[in-house]
Amino acid sequence: MNAYKRVMLKLSGEVLMGNQEFGIDPDLISRLAQELLDVQNSGVELAVVIGGGNIFRGMSGTASGMDRASADYMGMMATVMNAIALQDAIERHGGCVRTISALYIKEVAEPYIRRRAVRHLEKGRIVIFAAGTGNPYFTTDTAASLRAMEIQADVVLKGTKVDGVYTADPVLYPDATRYETLSFSTVLEKQLGVMDATAISLCRDNSMPIVVFDVTTPGQIAKVVAGEPVGTLVQEG
């Protein structure tokens, strides 16, 4: 019995790199696609938002002198590339999936229409939301939170390379400890970096729980959806 009926999974673009320095690891994305299908086949309605950091990051472009809006639009297009790659992997595993873009790219993705997205979920299709919110100055974390509200998801699952939220960076500080639960206020006050402040505030204001977990470990998505104590749960305190 799953703990959630409809979930929003946020994947960072960096996750798709695997052990590579950039781009997409074909073995990793194939394994992720199969896991997503297994979760969907268990009765969960599944939506996904993917970042584009494995291809291009808007903030890094800005740091190198680019106009912020231009850099952010490039980052949005990077997320479309990742979405198409994941869509292809899911289809190769026999799944039914739709990519919906906040930017109008009708040749490769459907335009974002909330009711259509919900209908796809109800029909048992995995929905991948691409191009963030379609606006510069907003992250894909914020896009995931926003879309989660719009489709009335039960939870936002933040899939990362780390198995939860720690008191400090566990790579730099080996004695850092992992939080099992956190309140939204604590995340904002301590600037714990779960998601950006806009995304956290949006989830807090709409009582949307967030689970931060290690998506690179096989089987973790199914465990989180089943309600097992995996990662860090962020909810109202």
Image (cartoon, helix red, strand yellow):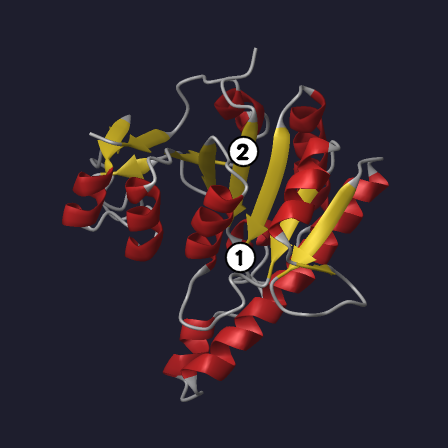
Name the disc covering residue 51, or none: 1
Looking at the image, which residue is at 53% across and 40% down? 9
Question: Residue 171: image x %, image y %?
Answer: 31, 46
Question: Residue 219: image x %, image y %?
Answer: 58, 25
Q: Label 2, on which residue? A: 7
Is residue 42 visible in the rendered image? The answer is yes
- Image depth: mark 1 or mark 2 in front: 2
Q: Secondary structure at mark 1?
A: loop
Looking at the image, which residue is at 50% across and 83% down? 70
- With respect to residue 142, does 231 lie above or below? above
- With respect to residue 141, does 118 lie above or below? above
Looking at the image, which residue is at 69% across and 32% down? 122
Of all residues, the one furthest to the front in this rendering is 115
* Residue type for callout 1: Gly
* Frontmost residue, 224 versus 98: 98
How packed mark 1 is, by other alpha carbons closer than 10 Å (few <14, some 14-19, many 20 or more), is many
